[in-house]
Image (cartoon, helix red, strand yellow):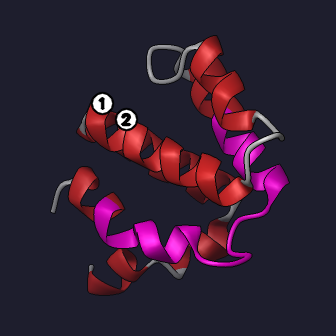
Amino acid sequence: QSYSHRLQHDMYFLTSTSRLNEQVVDKIVLQLNRVYPQILTNEEAEKFRNPKASLHTRLSDLLKHLQKKGDRHCQEFYRALQINAEQLFNDLPSRKIL
């Protein structure tokens, strides 16, 4: 199963109430921006960290953005999620299928 399909499968779980908090989302965005600037540019990272938009909206937009960019981008999101929120990563619906 591709990472893109996994992300599509996990999207509802990840964006549902209180699964990911502001700090964890910021850490993930910063990791994708700093470690892999080809995945998230500075401008894109600022957009996904903008406190004027709701966390749910920013997270949904980030996940859709990564899916459009392709499988490698989605894979790096999962790596960042595992590093910054290991328990949540282990609870993902797609991990239970695997």
Quick one: 35 or 69, which is closer to the camera? 69
Q: Is residue 63 above or below residue 8?
A: above
Q: Residue furthest left?
A: 1
Query: Is residue 26 located in the magenta-colored stretch of the structure?
Result: yes
Q: Residue furthest bottom?
A: 96
Task: From the image, tell me which residue sits under label 2.
Answer: 73
Q: Position of residue 92 (x, y in %)?
A: 47, 77
Quick one: 89 or 44, which is closer to the camera? 44
Task: From the image, tell me which residue sits under label 1.
Answer: 69
Label 2 element class = helix
> Which residue is rendered at x = 83% and y = 40% of the image?
51
Majority secondary structure of magenta residues: helix
Residue type at mark 2: give it: His
> Which residue is rendered at x = 64% and y = 60% of the image?
56
The magenta span reads 8-29
Q: Quadrant of residue 98?
A: bottom left
Q: Are marks 1 and 2 in contact (CB under 8 Å)?
A: yes
> Which residue is rendered at x = 58% and y = 58% of the image?
82
Q: Quadrant of residue 76?
A: top left
